[in-house]
Image: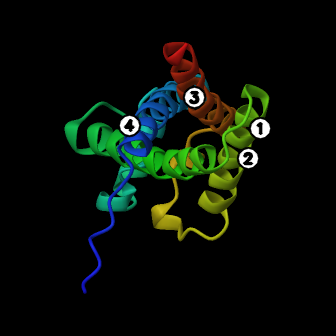
Amino acid sequence: MPMPPARLNPSWIARTNLSGSIAAVLSSVVVAACSACEARAPLAGVNAASQWFWGRRAKRHVGPSWRYTAVGYLVHHFSSLLWAGIYEAWCLRRPAPARVSAARAATVAMAACAVDYTITPPRFRPGFERHISRTSIAAVYVAFGVGLFAGAAARRRHVR
């Protein structure tokens, strides 16, 4: 007898979309702020993520454009959803109090940074490292972790 197709947990999908979207927006704001301060071009860091599609030209483009800015943000957003999916699967598998969820969000953010800057091929890295310092990159990943946890915290408040 054939096995029924596997189904994704709708709760996991909704949770991933919420926490991943908050994390993507928050970390993008930090990328833009750091890019504005350090490169004097707020969108340079956001544009750089579009190197997945446009190569090195994306890292050099500093102004707003559909080709670089929109695509760069979308790449970042979808990458954020991937990491949020890992975070949410962990939280669903082993529910825990808020402080443990915060530690998990920090762990996932650190793992994302480590993977992004060690095993990921250069073309598929975030790209904003060309425009902002290591300290600012750390701030971006802190914001990312805060965004993951904010999604979980918002759910907790909504459920009560």
Location of residue 124 with respect to 75 vertically, above or below: below
* Secondary structure of residue under mark 1: helix
Q: What distance separates the C-alpha of mark 4 from that of mark 1? A: 21 Å
Quadrant for residue 11, please give it.
top left
Camera-side mark, 4 or 2: 4
Q: What distance separates the C-alpha of mark 4 from that of mark 2? A: 21 Å
Q: Amino acid at mark 3?
A: Ala
Residue at mark 3: 152
Residue at mark 4: 14
Q: What distance separates the C-alpha of mark 2 from that of mark 3? A: 15 Å
Q: What distance separates the C-alpha of mark 3 from that of mark 1? A: 12 Å
Residue at mark 2: 107
Q: Amino acid at mark 1?
A: Ala
Circle number at residue 103: 1
CB atoms of marks 4 and 2 within 8 Å: no
* Secondary structure of residue under mark 3: helix
- Mark found first going from the N terminus, 2 or 3: 2
CB atoms of marks 4 and 3 within 8 Å: no
Mark 4 Cα-neighbour bin, 10 Å: few <14, some 14–19, many ≥20: few
